[in-house]
Image (spheres, rainbow, N blue to C red):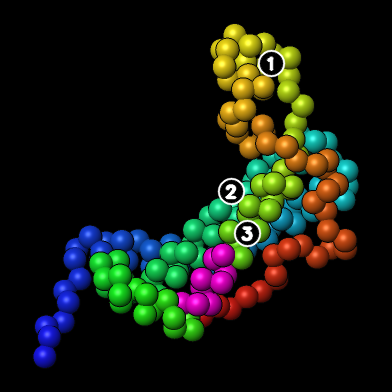
Amino acid sequence: MAKRTVVSQEATAKYEADAALAARFGDLFSQAQEAEQALRDAQSSRAPDEELHRLGMDLDGALTDVMRAAFAAQRAEIGPRGYDDRIYRRKAMATSKVRAWTMEAERLLTLRESHRLTGIVRLARSPAREHADSLVGSAGPDSGAIDSPDDQASPGPGAAASSGDEGVLPRATSVT
């Protein structure tokens, strides 16, 4: 019989870090729900663009954190051996628990990318910023470089609002 593969210390350290992050998934998910509700409330009360932009960026950060926790939970569900052994990892990816985490993580990734494209209000450029950009030269608005999410095109403040009080994040999930 073949000898059982020993897991490296590096893989064990990565596994422990992922397990710790995965344990925070519920809390991070709640924070994302709160951030989304704050944005939806501000949209319904016709808050100023600066406030909507700030709340949109807060939701983006919360979605990023919860998405990373879901991918960490996926890797933690596979186990420490999955960091070193690609065949073991591939077999583990076919189990129902890992597939559930994969689907949740990919759903959150899609939600975050959709929010980045349409949910963050674009603020008008201030004359001071335009002047500073013209002094820098090639980093101006016509250069094609995207420096921040502010520079990406997005529709107006009401475009991401959903009909009713329901947001896009479900109210309660249990993946395990």
Quick one: label 3 or label 2, which is nearer the N terminus? Answer: 2
**Label 3, label 1: how far apart the Cα atoms are:** 32 Å
Magenta span includes 11: no
Q: Is residue 124 placed above or below 118 in the rendered structure?
A: above
Three-letter residue code for mark 1: Glu
Total number of numbered labels?
A: 3
Q: Which secondary structure type mostly characterizes the magenta part of the structure?
A: helix
| Residue at 63% in and 11% down | 134
Secondary structure type for disc 2: helix
> What residue does disc 1 label?
130
Residue drawn where x is 49% and y is 84% of the image: 96
- Percent across and percent down for residue 126 are 73, 19
Amino acid carrying label 3: it is Thr
Q: Which residue is mark 3?
A: 110
Q: Is residue 62 left or right of residue 123?
A: left
Where is residue 47 drawn, in percent x and y?
84, 41
* Magenta-tinted stretch: 98-106
Other residues around mark 3 within 10 Å, as few (<14) / some (14–19) / many (≥20): few
* Residue at the (80%, 36%) spot, across then down: 49
> Mark 1 or 2, which is nearer the eye?
1
Q: Secondary structure at mark 1?
A: helix
Residue bearing mark 2: 61
Determine contact: label 3, label 1, CB under 8 Å: no
Any magenta on residue 103?
Answer: yes
